[in-house]
Amino acid sequence: MRYISTRGEAAARDFVGALLAGLAEDGGLFVPESWPHFSPADWRALRGLPYAELAARLIAPFVGDSIPFATLQALCHAAWTDFDHPAVVPLVQLETGLWVQELFHGPTLAFKDLALQLLGALFEHVLAARGERITIVGATSGDTGAAAIAACRGKPHLSVAILHPYGRISEVQRRQMTTVVAENVLNIAIEGSFDDCQDLVKALFNDRAFRIEMRLAAVNSINWARIAAQIPYYVASALALGAPDREVAFAVPTGNFGNVFAAYAARRLGLPIARLLVASNQNDILARFLARNDMSIRPSVQTLAPAMDIQISSNFERLLFELVERNGKATAQIVAEFRKSGRMPVPDYAWHRARLIFHGFRLDDTAILAEIRRVHARAGYLADPHTAIGIAAAEAAPVGHGVPMIALATAHPAKFPDAINQATGTRPPLPARFGDLYEKKEDYVILPNDLAAVQAAIRAKFLGNAA
Ligand SMILES: *Cc1c(COP(=O)(O)O)cnc(C)c1O
């Protein structure tokens, strides 16, 4: 399998090439040259497999001959052993026709662990074989960073530097990152928003000399391998609820569009997904796009669901590329105009296509609290603020009867105890294995929104000199 850039100007790579590169040289994102296809018989053959085995078989066509299948299988079987549920991604039924799929049983209690535990293992495998080291850099609105650090700690061929917006993530989220004190881990708090952090990471990659000097690699959701690693849980729940003989629908709490793009990828593989609900908080650019083709940036607002406080959903470019019939030039022009004017000129035909599959939804903070309270009262279920938006989207969805609706639970409620307490009067405790999180020492640096300062900090930590 080869990977091409959404902007059409970069050389194609194999899976490992796309894994190591992260972003393509033309600034685009890697996508598979063609979509693999699973027939109904292929789907049926996957029913009932343990999660790791299911994942290996689904990821295999994307890996191609880049990594032998037996190796991929072994990496998958090792990747999710730190999860505290034997099914890895269990389903919980809330009501007739409505399920929650819990993606938060991993080491940092958010769905990012599912992809990043595998990514860390893939990177370590590839680099150990080559005798090379890399520096992973990433921006986090809360959960990616912790999951990336958890996936890299103790891996001899990886260093990791994570940028988070100073004061804009929850204390649990910060502590999950900053209490990992290790030689190969650097936490940077940026005086700015998540979008500023994301722009800094892009700028680090665009500085060719720095990129080569530090051997930069990305683990935020622009990395194709992460999308690939997020496909299996959609398949697991769809098969459990009757696919391929019955359609299903998903409600996906969305920020960077990575998770919901993995659902789109599952659909392209042939999984019968009737609808994808793109659930947003007040940062509702995607909901406005889907409702009236208004993809225009507004100032980002802090909400109770901070992992979704995003205006520029970097993975949307992957969908755009598909919507404009994989025309890299057109994609590049539309994205450039978006960066320049803050408004994305998506052609009407492409917007109509998106609406055949995707449906937008938004919920403000007051309604998030009301939804957490409602779900708790009605089903005895504690949903974190992100999950609550997904459940509300599922409840409001224009999907036919008989189509099972699966709302993704993207974070454990204990990651957002204040919101849950405000809504329900209950403070969900952290699982016992996190008992000492509040006693541990933290280690991070606070920097201005300035590229040179970030580069100096990374050099100082991993090369041992402040350049
Ligand atoms: C990252 C995250 C999201 C958003 O996922 P994207 O792939 O960025 O769209 C939603 N909820 C939680 C809890 C997250 O950590």
Image: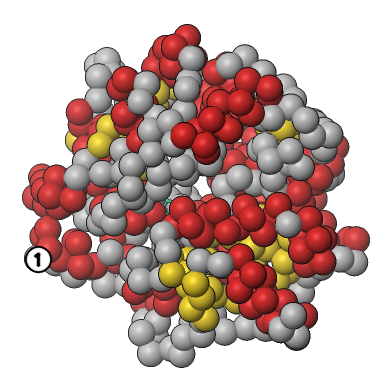
Q: Vertical placement of 327 versus 171: above or below?
A: above
Q: What amino acid type is highlighted by mark number 1?
A: Gly
Give the structural element (helix, strand or loop) at label 1. Answer: loop
Indicate the quadrant where residue 289 lies: top left
Q: From this viewpoint, which residue is outermost toward the top?
A: 349
Residue ID at (51%, 60%): 197
Q: Is residue 109 found left or right of 400 in the rendered image? A: right
- What crowding class fits label 1: few (fewer than 14 Cα within 10 Å), some (14-19), or many (20 or more)? few
Q: Is residue 62 found left or right of 410 in the rendered image? A: right
Which residue is under mark 1?
425
Q: Is residue 312 visible?
A: yes
Total marks shown come to: 1
Q: Is residue 270 visible?
A: no
Q: Vertical placement of 192 versus 457: above or below?
A: above
- The front one of 353 and 191 is 191
Residue ID at (28%, 44%): 281
Residue ID at (39%, 17%): 355
Residue ID at (40%, 47%): 310
Q: Vertical placement of 446 versus 392: above or below?
A: below
Q: Can you give x and y, in whole percent of width and height, for residue 127 in the image?
A: 83, 61
- The front one of 192 and 397 is 192
Q: Can you give x and y, in whole percent of width and height, for residue 395 in the image?
A: 20, 31
Instruction: Identify the image quadrant of the C terminus.
Output: bottom right
Indicate the quadrant where residue 126 lies: bottom right
Q: How is this picture coloured?
A: secondary structure
Q: CB of residue at label 1: within 8 Å of ligand 1?
A: no
Instruction: Identify the image quadrant of the N terminus.
Output: top right
Q: Can you give x and y, in whole percent of width and height, for residue 201 in the image?
A: 60, 57
Q: From this viewpoint, which residue is outermost toward the right?
A: 130
- The front one of 267 and 27 is 27
Q: Can you give x and y, in whole percent of width and height, for residue 253 in the image?
A: 36, 42
